[in-house]
Image (spheres, helix red, strand yellow):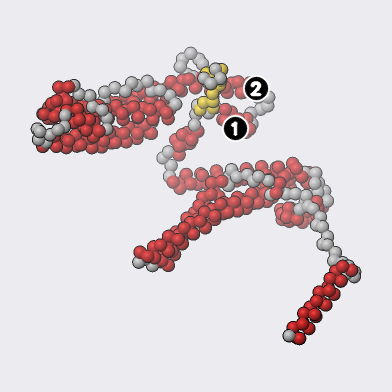
Amino acid sequence: MAFVENLLDQTQERLEAQMRERMEGVETFIDNLNDLEETDAHNPRQVLDELSNLVRFSLRLTPEQQRALRSEPEQVLPEVQNQVESYLANQAIVRLLGSIERRLEDSLEIEPGRVSLQDWPSFAELVLAALQNTFNRRRERLLGGNGDGSAGLIGADLQNALARLEEPIGPNALVHLLMLMPQGARAAFDRRTHRRVLLRTTRLTYVYYAAHLLEGQETEQITGQVLEHLERAHEAIRTAYGLMDWNRLAQTPIADLDAATQRGLQNVLDENLFQAAYHQPLGSLNNKNRDRVIAEMGRKTLTEVYRKLLLSVITELWVDYLTQMESLRVSIGLEAYAQRDPLVQYKNRAFSLFQELLNNMRLGVVSRMFTYRPRDLSAVQANIGRAEAPPAQISQGPEPVGVAQSVEEGRASHEKKRKRRRRH
Protein backbone atom coordinates (compact mmCIF):
# COMPACT_ATOMS: atom_id res chain seq x y z
CA MET A 1 0.00 0.00 0.00
CA ALA A 2 2.83 2.42 0.82
CA PHE A 3 4.38 1.72 -2.59
CA VAL A 4 1.15 2.75 -4.35
CA GLU A 5 0.81 5.89 -2.23
CA ASN A 6 4.35 6.96 -3.10
CA LEU A 7 3.71 6.15 -6.76
CA LEU A 8 0.56 8.31 -6.74
CA ASP A 9 2.45 11.26 -5.24
CA GLN A 10 5.31 10.91 -7.73
CA THR A 11 2.91 10.65 -10.67
CA GLN A 12 1.06 13.76 -9.56
CA GLU A 13 4.30 15.73 -9.27
CA ARG A 14 5.48 14.63 -12.72
CA LEU A 15 2.07 15.40 -14.21
CA GLU A 16 2.06 18.92 -12.78
CA ALA A 17 5.58 19.56 -14.08
CA GLN A 18 4.69 18.29 -17.58
CA MET A 19 1.51 20.35 -17.54
CA ARG A 20 3.37 23.55 -16.73
CA GLU A 21 5.97 22.89 -19.41
CA ARG A 22 3.42 22.18 -22.15
CA MET A 23 1.15 25.08 -21.20
CA GLU A 24 4.03 27.54 -21.23
CA GLY A 25 5.03 26.28 -24.66
CA VAL A 26 1.47 26.65 -25.98
CA GLU A 27 1.13 30.19 -24.63
CA THR A 28 4.48 31.18 -26.15
CA PHE A 29 3.40 29.71 -29.49
CA ILE A 30 0.11 31.65 -29.41
CA ASP A 31 1.94 34.89 -28.61
CA ASN A 32 4.24 34.33 -31.58
CA LEU A 33 1.22 33.78 -33.83
CA ASN A 34 -0.12 37.17 -32.83
CA ASP A 35 3.16 38.76 -33.88
CA LEU A 36 3.08 37.22 -37.37
CA GLU A 37 2.01 39.41 -40.23
CA GLU A 38 -1.15 38.52 -42.09
CA THR A 39 0.88 38.14 -45.27
CA ASP A 40 2.80 35.22 -43.75
CA ALA A 41 2.74 32.15 -46.00
CA HIS A 42 1.80 29.66 -43.22
CA ASN A 43 -1.63 28.12 -43.81
CA PRO A 44 -3.84 26.86 -40.92
CA ARG A 45 -2.84 23.23 -41.44
CA GLN A 46 0.86 24.02 -41.17
CA VAL A 47 0.24 26.02 -37.99
CA LEU A 48 -1.67 23.09 -36.47
CA ASP A 49 1.14 20.67 -37.34
CA GLU A 50 3.74 22.92 -35.71
CA LEU A 51 1.61 23.20 -32.57
CA SER A 52 1.12 19.41 -32.49
CA ASN A 53 4.87 18.89 -32.69
CA LEU A 54 5.29 21.31 -29.81
CA VAL A 55 2.86 19.50 -27.48
CA ARG A 56 4.13 16.07 -28.70
CA PHE A 57 0.77 14.63 -29.74
CA SER A 58 -1.74 15.18 -32.50
CA LEU A 59 -4.27 17.92 -31.76
CA ARG A 60 -7.79 17.52 -33.13
CA LEU A 61 -9.36 20.79 -34.30
CA THR A 62 -12.28 21.41 -36.63
CA PRO A 63 -11.67 23.34 -39.88
CA GLU A 64 -13.20 26.44 -38.30
CA GLN A 65 -10.92 26.12 -35.28
CA GLN A 66 -7.90 25.66 -37.55
CA ARG A 67 -8.70 28.88 -39.40
CA ALA A 68 -9.27 30.65 -36.09
CA LEU A 69 -5.93 29.35 -34.86
CA ARG A 70 -4.27 31.31 -37.69
CA SER A 71 -6.36 34.47 -37.50
CA GLU A 72 -7.54 34.68 -33.84
CA PRO A 73 -5.46 32.16 -31.82
CA GLU A 74 -6.77 33.37 -28.41
CA GLN A 75 -10.18 31.90 -29.19
CA VAL A 76 -8.72 28.41 -29.74
CA LEU A 77 -6.33 28.56 -26.76
CA PRO A 78 -8.82 27.10 -24.18
CA GLU A 79 -9.59 24.12 -26.44
CA VAL A 80 -5.89 23.42 -26.99
CA GLN A 81 -5.23 23.63 -23.25
CA ASN A 82 -8.09 21.22 -22.50
CA GLN A 83 -6.76 18.68 -25.01
CA VAL A 84 -3.23 18.96 -23.61
CA GLU A 85 -4.46 18.48 -20.04
CA SER A 86 -6.67 15.54 -21.00
CA TYR A 87 -3.90 13.83 -22.97
CA LEU A 88 -1.25 14.19 -20.26
CA ALA A 89 -3.62 13.09 -17.49
CA ASN A 90 -4.81 10.05 -19.46
CA GLN A 91 -1.23 9.07 -20.31
CA ALA A 92 -0.14 9.36 -16.67
CA ILE A 93 -3.14 7.32 -15.47
CA VAL A 94 -2.58 4.53 -17.99
CA ARG A 95 1.08 4.25 -17.01
CA LEU A 96 0.24 4.39 -13.32
CA LEU A 97 -2.39 1.65 -13.52
CA GLY A 98 -0.12 -0.48 -15.70
CA SER A 99 2.72 -0.18 -13.20
CA ILE A 100 0.49 -1.14 -10.26
CA GLU A 101 -1.14 -4.06 -12.08
CA ARG A 102 2.23 -5.35 -13.26
CA ARG A 103 3.46 -5.25 -9.66
CA LEU A 104 0.32 -6.96 -8.36
CA GLU A 105 0.04 -9.38 -11.28
CA ASP A 106 -3.69 -8.68 -11.11
CA SER A 107 -6.20 -6.20 -12.51
CA LEU A 108 -7.57 -3.25 -10.52
CA GLU A 109 -10.65 -3.14 -12.76
CA ILE A 110 -10.39 0.63 -13.27
CA GLU A 111 -11.11 2.15 -16.66
CA PRO A 112 -8.94 5.19 -17.41
CA GLY A 113 -11.30 8.13 -17.82
CA ARG A 114 -11.08 11.88 -17.99
CA VAL A 115 -9.20 13.02 -14.89
CA SER A 116 -7.93 16.53 -14.27
CA LEU A 117 -5.52 17.76 -11.65
CA GLN A 118 -8.46 19.00 -9.58
CA ASP A 119 -9.91 15.46 -9.55
CA TRP A 120 -6.61 13.80 -8.63
CA PRO A 121 -7.38 13.33 -4.88
CA SER A 122 -10.62 11.51 -5.71
CA PHE A 123 -8.80 9.42 -8.31
CA ALA A 124 -6.14 8.50 -5.74
CA GLU A 125 -8.85 7.37 -3.31
CA LEU A 126 -10.40 5.28 -6.09
CA VAL A 127 -7.07 3.57 -6.79
CA LEU A 128 -6.43 2.84 -3.10
CA ALA A 129 -9.95 1.44 -2.66
CA ALA A 130 -9.55 -0.79 -5.72
CA LEU A 131 -6.18 -1.93 -4.41
CA GLN A 132 -7.70 -2.87 -1.06
CA ASN A 133 -10.48 -4.80 -2.80
CA THR A 134 -7.88 -6.67 -4.84
CA PHE A 135 -6.01 -7.60 -1.67
CA ASN A 136 -9.23 -8.79 -0.04
CA ARG A 137 -10.10 -10.98 -3.02
CA ARG A 138 -6.61 -12.44 -3.09
CA ARG A 139 -6.71 -13.11 0.66
CA GLU A 140 -10.03 -14.92 0.35
CA ARG A 141 -8.79 -16.94 -2.61
CA LEU A 142 -5.56 -17.99 -0.90
CA LEU A 143 -6.62 -18.25 2.74
CA GLY A 144 -10.38 -18.73 2.56
CA GLY A 145 -12.67 -17.07 5.10
CA ASN A 146 -15.35 -15.89 2.67
CA GLY A 147 -18.12 -17.59 4.65
CA ASP A 148 -18.40 -20.83 2.66
CA GLY A 149 -16.05 -22.78 4.92
CA SER A 150 -13.34 -23.25 2.27
CA ALA A 151 -9.72 -23.31 3.37
CA GLY A 152 -8.38 -21.47 0.34
CA LEU A 153 -5.68 -22.57 -2.06
CA ILE A 154 -2.90 -22.46 0.51
CA GLY A 155 -4.98 -24.32 3.10
CA ALA A 156 -5.85 -27.02 0.58
CA ASP A 157 -2.20 -27.49 -0.40
CA LEU A 158 -1.15 -27.68 3.26
CA GLN A 159 -3.81 -30.29 3.99
CA ASN A 160 -2.64 -32.41 1.06
CA ALA A 161 1.00 -32.07 2.11
CA LEU A 162 0.22 -32.99 5.73
CA ALA A 163 -1.76 -36.02 4.58
CA ARG A 164 1.29 -37.28 2.68
CA LEU A 165 3.64 -36.98 5.65
CA GLU A 166 4.66 -40.34 7.04
CA GLU A 167 6.61 -39.05 10.06
CA PRO A 168 6.12 -36.45 12.81
CA ILE A 169 6.50 -32.83 11.79
CA GLY A 170 10.11 -31.79 12.27
CA PRO A 171 12.30 -28.91 11.10
CA ASN A 172 12.68 -30.37 7.60
CA ALA A 173 8.93 -30.82 7.22
CA LEU A 174 8.28 -27.26 8.41
CA VAL A 175 10.77 -25.87 5.89
CA HIS A 176 9.08 -27.91 3.16
CA LEU A 177 5.67 -26.52 4.11
CA LEU A 178 7.01 -22.96 4.23
CA MET A 179 8.51 -23.35 0.76
CA LEU A 180 5.24 -24.84 -0.49
CA MET A 181 3.08 -21.88 0.52
CA PRO A 182 4.55 -19.08 -1.68
CA GLN A 183 4.32 -21.04 -4.95
CA GLY A 184 1.21 -22.18 -6.78
CA ALA A 185 0.13 -23.44 -10.16
CA ARG A 186 -2.67 -22.53 -12.50
CA ALA A 187 -3.92 -24.05 -15.73
CA ALA A 188 -3.22 -22.19 -18.97
CA PHE A 189 -3.34 -22.79 -22.71
CA ASP A 190 -0.07 -22.87 -24.64
CA ARG A 191 -0.66 -21.15 -27.97
CA ARG A 192 2.43 -22.71 -29.51
CA THR A 193 1.69 -26.35 -28.71
CA HIS A 194 -2.09 -25.96 -28.29
CA ARG A 195 -1.98 -27.92 -25.08
CA ARG A 196 -3.10 -27.37 -21.55
CA VAL A 197 -0.13 -26.56 -19.29
CA LEU A 198 0.44 -25.65 -15.65
CA LEU A 199 2.12 -22.32 -14.95
CA ARG A 200 3.97 -21.61 -11.72
CA THR A 201 2.67 -18.53 -9.93
CA THR A 202 3.85 -16.55 -6.93
CA ARG A 203 1.29 -16.40 -4.13
CA LEU A 204 3.29 -14.86 -1.32
CA THR A 205 6.60 -13.06 -0.92
CA TYR A 206 8.20 -13.48 2.47
CA VAL A 207 10.40 -10.43 2.06
CA TYR A 208 7.38 -8.13 2.54
CA TYR A 209 6.47 -9.95 5.73
CA ALA A 210 10.06 -9.52 6.92
CA ALA A 211 9.82 -5.80 6.12
CA HIS A 212 6.71 -5.52 8.32
CA LEU A 213 8.56 -7.28 11.15
CA LEU A 214 11.45 -4.81 10.86
CA GLU A 215 9.20 -1.76 10.68
CA GLY A 216 9.75 0.63 13.58
CA GLN A 217 12.92 -1.02 14.89
CA GLU A 218 16.18 0.83 15.49
CA THR A 219 19.10 0.41 13.12
CA GLU A 220 21.34 -1.07 15.83
CA GLN A 221 18.70 -3.65 16.72
CA ILE A 222 18.24 -4.70 13.09
CA THR A 223 22.03 -4.91 12.64
CA GLY A 224 22.31 -7.18 15.66
CA GLN A 225 19.55 -9.44 14.38
CA VAL A 226 21.15 -9.69 10.93
CA LEU A 227 24.57 -10.54 12.39
CA GLU A 228 23.04 -13.15 14.69
CA HIS A 229 21.22 -14.71 11.75
CA LEU A 230 24.41 -14.78 9.66
CA GLU A 231 26.32 -16.41 12.51
CA ARG A 232 23.69 -19.14 12.77
CA ALA A 233 23.84 -19.61 9.00
CA HIS A 234 27.64 -19.88 9.21
CA GLU A 235 27.34 -22.50 11.94
CA ALA A 236 24.75 -24.45 9.94
CA ILE A 237 26.98 -24.51 6.84
CA ARG A 238 29.97 -25.58 8.92
CA THR A 239 27.96 -28.40 10.51
CA ALA A 240 26.72 -29.53 7.08
CA TYR A 241 30.28 -29.76 5.76
CA GLY A 242 31.35 -31.61 8.88
CA LEU A 243 28.54 -34.15 8.55
CA MET A 244 29.50 -34.76 4.93
CA ASP A 245 33.08 -35.54 5.98
CA TRP A 246 31.92 -37.67 8.92
CA ASN A 247 29.61 -39.80 6.79
CA ARG A 248 32.39 -40.29 4.28
CA LEU A 249 35.19 -41.06 6.76
CA ALA A 250 33.35 -42.65 9.70
CA GLN A 251 35.06 -46.01 9.10
CA THR A 252 38.51 -44.47 8.59
CA PRO A 253 41.08 -44.40 11.44
CA ILE A 254 42.65 -41.09 12.39
CA ALA A 255 46.03 -42.50 11.38
CA ASP A 256 44.89 -42.73 7.75
CA LEU A 257 43.74 -39.09 7.50
CA ASP A 258 45.84 -36.31 6.01
CA ALA A 259 48.24 -34.44 8.26
CA ALA A 260 46.20 -31.20 8.44
CA THR A 261 43.08 -33.05 9.58
CA GLN A 262 45.08 -34.99 12.17
CA ARG A 263 46.46 -31.77 13.65
CA GLY A 264 42.98 -30.29 13.85
CA LEU A 265 41.56 -33.37 15.59
CA GLN A 266 44.48 -33.42 17.99
CA ASN A 267 43.60 -29.87 19.05
CA VAL A 268 39.93 -30.63 19.79
CA LEU A 269 40.39 -34.07 21.41
CA ASP A 270 42.20 -34.86 24.64
CA GLU A 271 45.75 -36.08 24.16
CA ASN A 272 45.06 -39.44 25.79
CA LEU A 273 41.87 -39.90 23.77
CA PHE A 274 43.64 -38.93 20.56
CA GLN A 275 46.39 -41.49 21.16
CA ALA A 276 43.89 -44.20 22.16
CA ALA A 277 41.68 -43.61 19.10
CA TYR A 278 44.55 -43.02 16.68
CA HIS A 279 44.20 -46.44 15.06
CA GLN A 280 40.44 -46.77 15.66
CA PRO A 281 37.67 -45.78 13.20
CA LEU A 282 36.13 -42.36 13.78
CA GLY A 283 32.73 -43.97 14.23
CA SER A 284 33.91 -45.57 17.49
CA LEU A 285 33.92 -42.17 19.27
CA ASN A 286 31.05 -41.26 21.60
CA ASN A 287 28.49 -38.56 20.78
CA LYS A 288 30.33 -35.75 22.57
CA ASN A 289 33.61 -36.38 20.79
CA ARG A 290 31.71 -37.04 17.57
CA ASP A 291 30.30 -33.50 17.68
CA ARG A 292 33.80 -32.12 18.24
CA VAL A 293 35.16 -34.01 15.26
CA ILE A 294 32.26 -32.88 13.05
CA ALA A 295 32.77 -29.25 14.10
CA GLU A 296 36.53 -29.44 13.40
CA MET A 297 36.09 -31.08 10.00
CA GLY A 298 33.45 -28.54 9.05
CA ARG A 299 35.68 -25.68 10.19
CA LYS A 300 38.59 -26.95 8.10
CA THR A 301 36.46 -27.44 4.99
CA LEU A 302 34.73 -24.08 5.35
CA THR A 303 38.08 -22.34 5.83
CA GLU A 304 39.32 -23.83 2.57
CA VAL A 305 36.08 -22.83 0.83
CA TYR A 306 36.48 -19.23 2.02
CA ARG A 307 40.11 -19.27 0.90
CA LYS A 308 39.11 -20.33 -2.59
CA LEU A 309 36.32 -17.75 -2.63
CA LEU A 310 38.70 -14.97 -1.62
CA LEU A 311 41.21 -16.08 -4.24
CA SER A 312 38.59 -16.14 -7.00
CA VAL A 313 37.23 -12.69 -6.05
CA ILE A 314 40.72 -11.18 -5.87
CA THR A 315 41.71 -12.72 -9.21
CA GLU A 316 38.58 -11.44 -10.91
CA LEU A 317 38.82 -7.90 -9.52
CA TRP A 318 42.60 -7.63 -9.86
CA VAL A 319 42.43 -8.03 -13.62
CA ASP A 320 39.92 -5.19 -13.83
CA TYR A 321 42.06 -3.08 -11.50
CA LEU A 322 45.16 -3.51 -13.67
CA THR A 323 43.14 -2.57 -16.75
CA GLN A 324 41.91 0.58 -15.01
CA MET A 325 45.43 1.48 -13.91
CA GLU A 326 46.70 1.14 -17.47
CA SER A 327 43.90 3.38 -18.71
CA LEU A 328 44.72 5.84 -15.93
CA ARG A 329 48.37 5.92 -16.94
CA VAL A 330 47.45 6.76 -20.53
CA SER A 331 44.91 9.41 -19.55
CA ILE A 332 47.28 11.08 -17.08
CA GLY A 333 49.90 11.29 -19.82
CA LEU A 334 47.40 13.11 -22.01
CA GLU A 335 46.40 15.47 -19.19
CA ALA A 336 50.02 16.51 -18.80
CA TYR A 337 49.52 18.58 -21.96
CA ALA A 338 46.72 20.47 -20.17
CA GLN A 339 49.19 22.03 -17.70
CA ARG A 340 48.24 19.66 -14.86
CA ASP A 341 50.68 17.99 -12.52
CA PRO A 342 50.55 14.37 -13.74
CA LEU A 343 52.13 12.89 -10.61
CA VAL A 344 49.58 14.44 -8.24
CA GLN A 345 46.67 13.46 -10.46
CA TYR A 346 47.99 9.92 -10.81
CA LYS A 347 48.41 9.46 -7.05
CA ASN A 348 44.94 10.79 -6.25
CA ARG A 349 43.13 8.65 -8.79
CA ALA A 350 45.23 5.56 -8.11
CA PHE A 351 44.42 5.85 -4.41
CA SER A 352 40.70 6.09 -5.21
CA LEU A 353 40.89 3.06 -7.51
CA PHE A 354 42.68 1.03 -4.85
CA GLN A 355 40.10 1.93 -2.21
CA GLU A 356 37.37 0.94 -4.64
CA LEU A 357 39.18 -2.35 -5.25
CA LEU A 358 39.25 -3.14 -1.51
CA ASN A 359 35.57 -2.26 -1.11
CA ASN A 360 34.60 -4.45 -4.06
CA MET A 361 36.63 -7.32 -2.60
CA ARG A 362 34.81 -7.08 0.72
CA LEU A 363 31.46 -6.80 -1.01
CA GLY A 364 32.18 -9.72 -3.33
CA VAL A 365 33.26 -12.02 -0.50
CA VAL A 366 30.44 -11.13 1.89
CA SER A 367 27.74 -11.35 -0.77
CA ARG A 368 28.87 -14.83 -1.92
CA MET A 369 30.24 -16.45 1.23
CA PHE A 370 26.90 -18.13 2.04
CA THR A 371 26.17 -19.31 -1.50
CA TYR A 372 29.60 -20.08 -2.97
CA ARG A 373 30.30 -23.74 -3.67
CA PRO A 374 33.65 -24.85 -5.14
CA ARG A 375 33.51 -26.92 -8.29
CA ASP A 376 35.76 -29.61 -6.82
CA LEU A 377 34.55 -30.05 -3.25
CA SER A 378 36.88 -32.99 -2.63
CA ALA A 379 39.86 -30.63 -2.93
CA VAL A 380 38.85 -28.78 0.26
CA GLN A 381 37.52 -31.71 2.32
CA ALA A 382 39.38 -33.96 4.72
CA ASN A 383 40.96 -36.85 2.84
CA ILE A 384 42.78 -40.07 3.50
CA GLY A 385 46.52 -39.43 3.71
CA ARG A 386 48.69 -40.57 0.83
CA ALA A 387 52.22 -41.85 1.33
CA GLU A 388 54.78 -39.62 -0.31
CA ALA A 389 56.81 -41.18 -3.09
CA PRO A 390 60.51 -41.60 -2.21
CA PRO A 391 62.85 -39.20 -3.98
CA ALA A 392 64.47 -40.44 -7.13
CA GLN A 393 67.89 -42.05 -6.60
CA ILE A 394 70.84 -40.47 -8.38
CA SER A 395 73.04 -43.03 -10.09
CA GLN A 396 76.61 -43.15 -8.79
CA GLY A 397 77.93 -45.63 -11.38
CA PRO A 398 80.16 -44.89 -14.37
CA GLU A 399 78.83 -42.60 -16.99
CA PRO A 400 77.49 -44.15 -20.17
CA VAL A 401 79.98 -44.58 -22.95
CA GLY A 402 78.14 -42.19 -25.25
CA VAL A 403 78.18 -39.40 -22.69
CA ALA A 404 81.87 -39.82 -21.86
CA GLN A 405 82.77 -39.90 -25.53
CA SER A 406 80.83 -36.70 -26.19
CA VAL A 407 82.65 -34.93 -23.36
CA GLU A 408 86.09 -35.99 -24.68
CA GLU A 409 85.22 -34.87 -28.20
CA GLY A 410 84.13 -31.49 -26.87
CA ARG A 411 87.40 -31.01 -25.00
CA ALA A 412 89.49 -31.94 -28.08
CA SER A 413 87.58 -29.48 -30.25
CA HIS A 414 88.13 -26.73 -27.69
CA GLU A 415 91.91 -27.37 -27.61
CA LYS A 416 92.12 -27.23 -31.43
CA LYS A 417 90.38 -23.83 -31.46
CA ARG A 418 92.81 -22.45 -28.87
CA LYS A 419 95.86 -23.59 -30.87
CA ARG A 420 94.42 -22.09 -34.05
CA ARG A 421 93.94 -18.69 -32.34
CA ARG A 422 97.55 -18.74 -31.06
CA ARG A 423 98.95 -19.28 -34.58
CA HIS A 424 97.07 -16.29 -35.87
Left or right of residue 72: residue 313: right
Q: Quadrant of residue 415?
A: bottom right
Residue 196 vertical placement versus 49 (above, below): above
Vertically, is 323 above or below 6?
below
Name the amino acid, label 2.
Arg
- Horizontal arrangement in the rendering, residue 412 relative to residue 146 (left or right): right
Residue 111 visible to the viewer:
yes
Residue 235 placement (x, y as % from top left): 62, 45
Mark 1 sits on what residue? 175
Crowdedness near tag 1: few (<14), some (14–19) or many (≥20) residues, C-alpha within 10 Å: few
Residue placed most toward the observer, 396 or 391: 396
- Left or right, 216 with respect to 274, comes to left
User: Which residue occupies the foreground of this view, 114 or 184?
Assistant: 114
Vertical arrangement, residue 407 with respect to residue 349, above or below: below
Estimate the x, y position of residue 381 in percent, counting from the top left.
70, 48
Task: Determine the residue positioned at 56% across, 17% down.
Answer: 195
Q: Nearer the viewer, residue 20 or 32?
A: 32
Quadrant in which the C terminus is drawn? bottom right
Which comes before the other along the chain, label 1 or label 2?
2
Residue under the point 39% across and 62% down = 335
Residue 389: name its quadrant: bottom right
Q: Secondary structure at mark 2?
A: helix
Residue at the spot 65% in from the left edge and 51% down from the top edge: 304
Which of the numbered marks, if any, corresponds to residue 164?
Answer: 2
Against 254, is 87 above or below?
A: above
Q: Amino acid at mark 1?
A: Val
Residue density around tag 2, few if under 14, some if 14–19, many if 20 or more, within 10 Å: few
The quarter of the displayed image where residue 160 is located? top right
